[in-house]
Structure formats: structure tokens, C-alpha cells
Image (tube, rainbow, N blue to C red):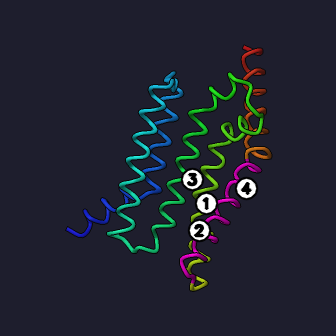
Amino acid sequence: VPEAWAALHFWTSSTILKFLAGNVLGYAYARGVRFDVSRAAALGVGCVAFVLHWCTYALFLDRPDTFVFHLLTAAFSGTMVGCAVLTPFVEARNKPRWLVELGDSTYSIYLSHIFVYVPAYAVLQSLFVMTMPQRVVVAVACFVFSLLLGWASYRRIELPLIAWARGVRRRSSAGA
């Protein structure tokens, strides 16, 4: 049944799985689940197992040259989850402000990963015939560009919107 396989391929694609995992983590956090050491360790083990499975699939069943792309996107997602999970620990121990800000801006960076990193890499891959070392350099450059754009959108878009929403909520609760 070709339609069923197409749907299965869609729902098991890396972008959808990362999106769903992000929603589950966000929902759990909003419901009061806090990532203590044991939960963070369990989450880390699950992420590592998923990354190993995903990269093995890319290396042996998919085209081997997409392994670099899969590995970097998995590392990117793992970095975002790690920053989100470790932010409370970093804040409690007065670590560098930039590290805390990286944790705070993970959602913006995650969105830039989807809308910047993936298309930029795909466009460059379609325009140029690249060797494996060139693919690695392009992937890392797209990764860095995505990080910077995500951080900038956090500072220039997300923070002002959060401040505006808090102001609206304060004014509406004061008027009630």
C-alpha cells in the first residue's frame, strides 16, 4: 500500500519526530515536570539511542553521503534539548550569562534550524556538486548561521513579544 508507506515515511521523518519531541518536552515542562538529574539522564540516554538509530539508518539504508547531514541535525537537536534541560542548573549555579541566554533562546534557535539550516543546506547541495569534506564545511556553516539567526530572532522578536504579552496580561488583570 504505497499511501501507507508515504504516511509512515512522513511521520518518521526527522523534522516531524523532532517537532513532536519538542512539543512533548514543552508540554511536560508547562505541566510542572522538572528535569532533575535522573530525568535528564534518562532523556539523554533516549536521545543518544535515537541519534544512533537515526544515523545508522542514514549511513546504511539511505544514501551514505546524507550521514553528515543527519548527524549534524541530530547534534543540533541534542544541543537544543540539552540547553533547555540544563538551563535551571546553570541559572542556579550563576554560570555565564551567555550560557543561560542560549538555554532561554532554544525555541527560536530550533525554529531557525527548521526554516534556515535545512533549506540553506538543501539549496547549496542542489546548486553545487560537493565532495564529502565540502558537505561537512557547508553543514557546519549552515549550523553556525542558524544559531546566530535564532539568537538574533530571540533578542529582537521573541523577547519584545514576551514583554508585550506580559504587559497586556498585567493591564487586563489590573482592570478586572
Q: Is 26 on the left or on the right of 59, as rendered?
A: right
Question: x and y percent of residue 29 in the render?
Answer: 52, 28
Q: Which residues are magenta?
A: 130-153
Query: Chief secondary structure of the magenta span?
Result: helix
Question: x and y percent of residue 120 in the render?
Answer: 63, 69
What residue is disc 3 on? 76
What residue is disc 4 on? 149
> In the rendered image, which quarter contains the C terminus?
top right
> In the rendered image, which quarter contains the N terminus?
bottom left
CA–CA distance in space, label 3 to label 2 = 15 Å
- Residue at point 44%, 53% (across, down): 16
Mark sitting earlier along the chain (3/4) = 3
What residue is disc 1 on? 115
Crowd band around label 1 with a 10 angstrom C-alpha radius: few (<14), some (14–19), many (20+): few
Looking at the rendered image, the disc whose residue lies closer to the viewer, 3 or 1, is: 3
Please name the amino acid that badge 3 sits on.
Answer: Phe
Mark sitting earlier along the chain (4/1) = 1
Residue farthest to the left?
A: 1
